Amino acid sequence: MIILSVNKSLRLIELCAVKQFTSYRNFSLTSVCEAHKQAGKYRTTRNRSRPLTYEMANLPTTIAHYKSWNSWNTSCMFEGVRPAETAVEDEFIRKFITGTWHNLFVSEIIIKRQYNIIRVAGIIYRGIQQRKMYFLIGYSEELLSYWLQCPVKLELQTVSSRKDVIFKYI
Amino acid sequence: MSLSNILQNTRCYICGLNLLRSTEAQIFIRMCSNISESKEIVIPKRIPRGPTDILKALASTIKRDPTAPHYKFHDDPYLIPISNSSKRIFALSQESGRKTAMWVREKHAELFQHREAEPPIEAFFPKIVYDETDDVDNETLAKLIKSALISDSINVYKLMQKCNVEISEDNKQALLELLCFFNETEQLAEELIEERWFSRDMSENLKKTWRNGSYAEKLFEELPKNSKTYSAIILGMLKYNEIERGYKLYQEAINEGFILSVNVYNSIIKVSSLVASLEQRWNFITENLSIMNEHGHKPNLQTLNAILFALMRMPKKSKKQELALNTIAELKKFGVEPSLGSYHFLLLIFSNVQDISTHFNILSSILDNIQGKEFTIRDSSDVLFFFTAMDTCRYYLNDINIAYRVNELLWFGNNYNLIGNSIRESIYYRNFFCLIIQSEDLKTIFKFYDFYVPNIYTPEINVMEELIKTVTMNGAVEYYPKLWTDIVLFEMWNKQQILIELLRGMVLNNVSCIPPSEISIQLGETAWSSFVKNEDSLIKTKIEWTGEMLGNILSLCLSADNFERAGKIFMKLVKDETQIIGVPQFNTLNTFLDACIKNRDVKLCFMCIEYSFENGYDNVTSLAKKLIKNINLSPANKTHLAALLGQEIFKDEEELNNMQTDATI
């Protein structure tokens, strides 16, 4: 249950970890658990009007098959460092970006860590003028660097319509 | 698989390899033989490497890619700037965002006290504010001075005095030097590169900006008088144009027998134009050089540049050219190699010479000297060279070949770092492009245009105008649509002179035929879009349409066989008749009337004739006659026409009718 309360992407990584861990202990999830799994699934509407992005349309089980992770780091690998801190920081970055770029992100926020650099990627809607976007880029990069004390870079792609990212309606 | 089989396969493989890569194989064999032959292994000497050497080596593998925007911009179609103003605005907006973050950090310093990185990185922490409760010592002061934080250093210095902490002599001297160097004004933070790059401050500051009675002066009074303190205060005063007092202190120091630092002598030479009279100036310089010599200083690059600067300020009729060349030759004996800045001054010294060949000689011999060399900044004036050189190429020499050589030098190695700032860069390219447009054929012009525009350089309005004129002169119609697209991207679509030139050129070179050729259709499309773009824009300062411009659009639409659009343009002409300056050519109206007749639009025909009548064309009757001849007018129309132009215009028709009736009779 604790696992389920953490954010979606994290949950997936940790789920994998739990799976590994459990298999090592010769313990397996029962089919009952599998059947009640709700995370990362979207309910179908009667008139099929719920828009889904590609990321949302694919179930969490298809990670590494049809879609990819939202957080890229090595903290959960063998001898990886700062797993908890990384998770909390990633959550902080997500909250900060969604709040700063209010109503502009139309995709998940992807956080990639390489060496000491954090790259934050995503797709945004062209809802504001370019120069305001540049202001926000400068502001987010600088403030996040102060907070996380490492270089932070934003890698954004823009779309002219919110519909551009919709993969299907359910 | 048997062993022999395997062997055979391997052999086949090796054979194939030999055939394919025979040379490589040979090299390999040679290498093998070398190894067996040489007995002693010579280990090369270790090359000492700096911490960033590997990064520099990596960076050197990447060249500026003209097809991509500058790396400071976000790589996304929406976020890539094209016009000059957007380049500036985007970069500065980003920096403004960074400054906001800095402000947040300073305002809420208590929130940013965590230490995440190990070892801690100072640059990410908020600035430390010192107050009376803090323990301040010499070490803190030294650190602050080293990081050039002026007001903080003064604060800590005062605090230390208050708390009776003994301040070391070194620190006092360092503080004095810091205050003198920056004139006690806080500097633009080092990380704000864009603000520096886009600063519009081009002029050499000749105003006195030195702060009288400043803390530096007080500190100078407090400190024991010696050569170091004198050097610092004189340098500060001279740098911020407090010449009189600076010079007085200099004389004082010399009289007291202090040996000042070499920079002081250089600065004194540099300001000689403000100290010594015209006749005395060269003597003044030589005197100071001999004092330098007495004090055991060797001249350095700054001495050379100071002398050249002083010579540049000399009047036209002096022998400054000769003196400058002699100085360079003389200082070469001391091992002073002139920097790019020296050449910049040299070009300016020679700029008064009327004779073009001397100009040519000086720039080409400078280029002979420095072609294919890589430069790093050695003097602050080095960043002026490329700008001045291209200026000379355009205004004095008018020689494209030498401009190519200058450009080649600029793009060699890391020389591009010495372009200066954004203004100098754009002026450099403006001169370069004007020269290319003047002297090259259209194909070459567009080769350069495609390479530099828009990522490295965006042409200014006058350059674009020149380009359009050249295209017009060459009659290269196919370039107009492309130019118009670029004009829209450069945000020049509402500039009067650009539109006038473009439309005039298109009309001049357009060959109308029936049915319209593809290029005519394209030109019509371009002209129409230039009209619509300006009509639909929400910008307050709208373009002032002239009769000629609208007439040109009209005729282009007609030649593209688009009567509907032509009608709209004509309606604009009629509707805003009072605001539009000038009238279209008669020919245009004539063709328009033909088109109206062809399309059987009697209303427009009448409007056309009325318009021509109101604007006083000579040949209105010919238009009316044409109308009468081609269209059977109703009686009401006929009376209207007669009221406008008199009954005579029906004369011909009546005669014709009469003749016809006669013939039938």
Image: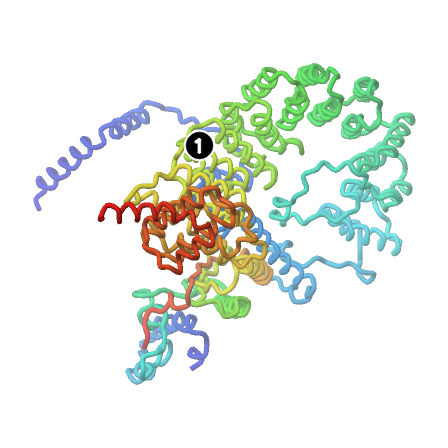
The x, y position of residue B227, in whole percent, is 85, 32
Q: Nearer the viewer, residue B174 or B401?
A: B401
Observer able to see residue B117 = no
Residue B336, quarter of the rendered image = top right
Other-residue count near label 1 (Cα within 10 Å), few / some / many at <14 / 14–19 / ≥20: few
The residue labelled by disc 1 is B473
The x, y position of residue B10, in whole percent, is 15, 38
Left or right of B192, for residue B398: left
The x, y position of residue B595, in whole percent, is 35, 50
Q: Nearer the viewer, residue B342 or B295?
A: B342
Residue B300, quarter of the rendered image = top right
Residue A165, quarter of the rendered image = bottom left
Q: Nearer the viewer, residue B85 or A75?
A: B85
Q: Residue at x 83, y 61 (%)?
A: B132
Residue B608 in the image: above or below residue B38: below
Left or right of A3, for residue B516: left
Observer able to see residue B324 = yes
Q: Nearer the viewer, residue B654 or B613?
A: B654
Left or right of A47, for residue B69: right
Chain ID at mark 1: B
Badge 1 marks a residue whose secondary structure is helix
Tell me which colouring the rendered structure shows.
rainbow
Q: Residue at x 89, y 31 (%)?
A: B248
Q: Residue furthest front?
A: B665
- Residue type at tag 1: Met
Q: Residue at x 91, y 27 (%)?
A: B256
Q: Residue at x 74, y 38 (%)?
A: B205
